[in-house]
Amino acid sequence: MSYGSHRVLDGLSIAVPAGSITALLGGNGAGKSTTLSLLLGFVRPNDGRVTVCGVDPGVEPDHARGRTAYLPENVALYDHLTAVENASYLLALSGNRPSRAAILDAFAAAGLQERAWDARLSGFSKGMRQKVAIAVAWLREVPVLLLDEPTSGLDPQATADFNALLHAIRVRNTAVLMVTHDLLSAVDVADRIGFLERGRIVEEVAATGTERFDIRALRARFGERARAA
Ligand SMILES: Nc1ncnc2c1ncn2[C@@H]1O[C@H](COP(=O)(O)OP(=O)(O)OP(=O)(O)O)[C@@H](O)[C@H]1O
């Protein structure tokens, strides 16, 4: 994938199975957001193949996006609407009409405090907005979830709430791809981490069984890579 003569992704090969969380970790400019743009059909590759649920999002963007929930780093929500109104409106756009009770259940699962449910979003923190957005993604019940730096700027409790709902979404057999430059957030939540460097995956690690990742070893390896790049 190139922008003009600038090659951004080069031989990137990745498959995100249903029921798993893959984190794509890389520094600034590594190609993380471009990877998501390809999966959303916002851009098309110069060469190679992209499929979402068996469909090329560049050729059939509506079909692919209908099966995908996408959380950009800064979620676009409506400040003049309440949390419930935002969820109802956004879900109606994708043809979903959940009951108020279902929306409130999703908010509770996302850790959004009850007093915020019927409050306008204008006073919401970034963490509260992320909780509304992940609740909407949960209610869409789509097989693919794409996340761009989902926990950047969130405090530890908000991050923990967010990660808990992400796990619940994964258990529902969703394929989750998260891009981030934050090793800690990848280690917290992912089953598999791919290290993206100059547009290709240079290393892949997987959490095995009940063992989580060895954060010290990963930090040393990722730090070395970042220094060498
Ligand atoms: N629309 C565009 N036109 C030209 N170049 C672009 C465009 N979008 C991204 N790039 C370039 O492609 C490269 C990869 O960008 P991308 O946003 O995918 O990286 P990233 O890993 O998400 O980085 P960051 O962590 O900084 O968001 C960068 O060098 C960037 O300048």
Image (cartoon, helix red, strand yellow):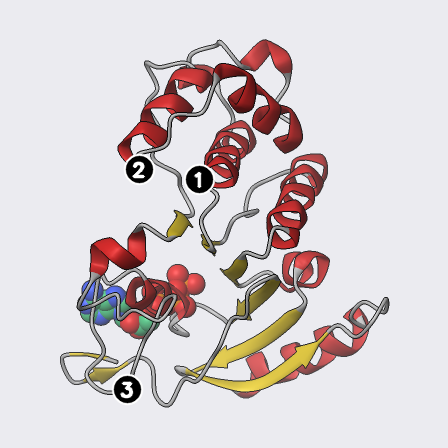
Give the labeled residue for mark 1: 140
Marks 3 and 1 in Cβ contact (< 8 Å)? no
- The answer to whether residue 65 is above or below residue 209 is above
Q: Residue furthest left?
A: 4
Q: Earlier in the sequence, mark 3 or mark 1?
A: 3
Query: Few, some or many C-alpha atoms within 10 Å of disc 2 (few <14, some 14-19, many ≥20)?
Result: few
Q: State ligand 1's quadrant.
A: bottom left
- State the image quarter where residue 208 is shown: bottom right
Marks 1 and 2 in Cβ contact (< 8 Å)? yes
Query: 132 or 33: which is nearer to us?
Result: 132
Give the labeled residue for mark 2: 94
Q: Amino acid at mark 2?
A: Ser
Local SS, label 1: helix
Marks 2 and 3 in Cβ contact (< 8 Å)? no
Q: Amino acid at mark 1?
A: Arg
Rendering coords of residue 130 (x, y %): 51, 36
Give the labeled residue for mark 3: 48
- Quarter of the figure with the N terminus: bottom left
Disc 1 from disc 2: Cα separation: 8 Å
Disc 2 from disc 3: Cα separation: 29 Å
